[in-house]
Image: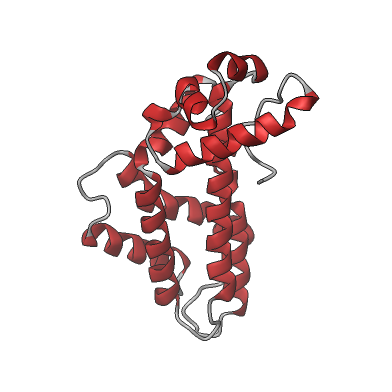
Amino acid sequence: MNKNTVVKFSKTKQSRSEKTLNDLLDAAGQLVTGADPKNFTARSLSEKSGYALGTLLNRLESVENVFLWVIEKQRDEHIQSVVNIIEAFDRDKPIQELAELLAEKTFVTIKAVNPKVIQFVEGRLIKRDQFSSKYFHYLDPIAEALFKNSKINTSNTFRAITENEARLMLRSFVMVVERPFVEEDVIAGSNEHRRIAIESFVRLFGA
């Protein structure tokens, strides 16, 4: 997982609980894939995993952290898939095509995740006073890939940027793409939203 991960998974109280932990993580993964935060509970985890509720509560320091850990793991897998898209992007193709690929990938992922899952994570982090500037460091691998791509692209449609520019401008792009979904804005996922996202990327990173 990303070294800047904010939420740390609480260790089980006994080392012999490793199998139990893996079973619970698998069960939590299925519930998270279902994308309904109403099911991110000890009772739902008990039912899905087959472990008695009392056993589950006894073995874990925090049931909530099980779900946060799984969500974070899935998020980092998505980040890596985006990095793969950027690294595989043909250096002779223009920035417009990369913008379209990234917008499409992100739109599909957010819709599958369900914005309420993002709301769940942010709400828990705010409650724990952990929603800090470091939260968005999970995007840094994408920023690094964009910086490297801008150096090798030969289409003359990418402008020269620094690593810090890539890092900060990526945050702006993610806000344009993600926040309408999280805030349940009527524009979310529409053709207009897609157009704005693509044009924003081109303006930020284009020549």
Name the residue located 56 percent from the left edge and 66 percent from the top edge: 146
The extreme left residue here reads 186
In the image, residue 83 sits, relative to residue 30, either above or below, namely below
Residue 149 is left or right of residue 180, and the answer is right
**Whole-percent x, y for residue 6 in the image:** 61, 34
The extreme right residue here reads 15
**Whole-percent x, y for residue 182 in the image:** 34, 40
In the image, residue 166 sits, relative to residue 89, either above or below, namely above
Q: Does residue 3 appear in this view?
A: yes
Image colouring: secondary structure
In the image, residue 88 sits, relative to residue 9, either above or below, namely below
Name the residue located 39 percent from the left edge and 62 percent from the top edge: 103
Q: In the depicted view, which residue is nearer to us: 109 or 178?
A: 109
Quarter assignment of residue 132? top right
**Whole-percent x, y for residue 107 in the image:** 36, 57
Q: Does residue 132 appear in this view?
A: no
Name the residue located 71 percent from the left edge and 23 percent from the top edge: 12
**Whole-percent x, y for residue 200 in the image:** 37, 61
Q: How many marks?
A: 0
Name the residue located 52 percent from the left edge and 30 percent from the top edge: 131
